[in-house]
Amino acid sequence: MSGRRPTPLTPDTYAQALTQRVPELSELAQVDTRILCNLDSSDLGPEEWSAIADEVAAARESHDGVVIIHGTDTMAYTAAALSYSLVGLDRPVILTGSQRPLAEVRSDARRNLVDAVDLARRDLPEVGIAFDGHLWRGNRAKKGDAWSYRAFTSPHCPPLARLGLDVEVATHVRRPTEPFAVDARFDPRVVSALVTPGLDPAALVRLAEGSLGLVLAAFGVGTAPRRIRPIELAVRALVDAGVTVLVVTQAQSGTVDLSLYENGAALRDAGAIAGADMTLEAAVVKLMAACARFDDLDARRAWIERDVAGERGSIERHLRD
């Protein structure tokens, strides 16, 4: 017995195939479709994020919600970008996709798409990722599994909604506090680096050459080597050169605290910004947005340290308390 993957869909056939293969969508809502781009998600970046934000803003005038079908590999980056771009969002913007294509027999695309359209009709004014029966806050989600249907995790924020026999909406859904506006500026001159034992500080300086920002994924709560090859020397050199350095943790969960250990305090004293519990994806995109919006380094730092769209701050601890 041999197996064959279906031919990839092209943009002009996509909308027709969508309604044919998932006819129940028309029972949930009147669905209008737009083809914005047909790219592998690894090719999406700041230009596409801006275009998607503008398209969402245009659709908002005549639609109750927006569903964005997106490849899973960079979905968390796009979701974070939209959460920063769509200021004062007052209706749902739901990203979804699948681990297996819609045309395959064991695809998870049908369920995810139905869930996303259902959620887009509800009172959920956030950018979220609908996947495997959960709605995750977009700027808190990470792709954690490349194989199973439960592709996404959210280390510090419980689901905004759970979809089972009914739809259970959580109490920590954010509400708009300002008028709707779009600011979809991103500067791609941001790099990221993983701290490793024995890392040469000069390598970080070379990596960030010509960049405006560096996201440094440090150990634990924000520590880096300093006994033989002090990483804070690279951080100080970059900060003095006008590069904004943002520290996140490479751990699966946890919060960066640059005052807890001497090796973390050295990064702080060199001018690094603590990224709290932001994911790498949320931090990279936020730094791109900050570099595009603020030339003044103090204003840039203040915006990064502020919770803009629910991307930082322990929701789990708040719910327990």
Image (cartoon, rainbow, N blue to C red):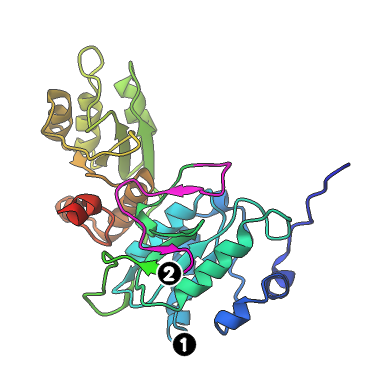
Q: Considering the image in quadrants, where does the N terminus appear?
A: top right
Pinpoint residue 82: horizontal percent, then vertical percent.
39, 64
Q: Say which amino acid is labelled 2.
A: Val
| Residue at 36% in and 24% down | 203
Q: Residue furthest front?
A: 165
Residue occupied by mark 1: 62
Asked if disc 2 and disc 1 are in contact, CB closer than 8 Å, the reply is no
Discs 2/1, front: 2
User: Which of the two residues, 96 or 230, is positioned nearer the viewer here?
Assistant: 96
Label 1 sits on a secondary structure element that is loop
Above or below: residue 116 compared with residue 6: below
Q: Is residue 35 visible?
A: yes
| Residue at 38% in and 40% down | 191
Mark number, residue 167: 2
Give the quarter of the image for residue 87. Answer: bottom left
Mark number, residue 159: none
Pinpoint residue 128: horizontal percent, then vertical percent.
41, 63
Pinpoint residue 89: horizontal percent, then vertical percent.
33, 74
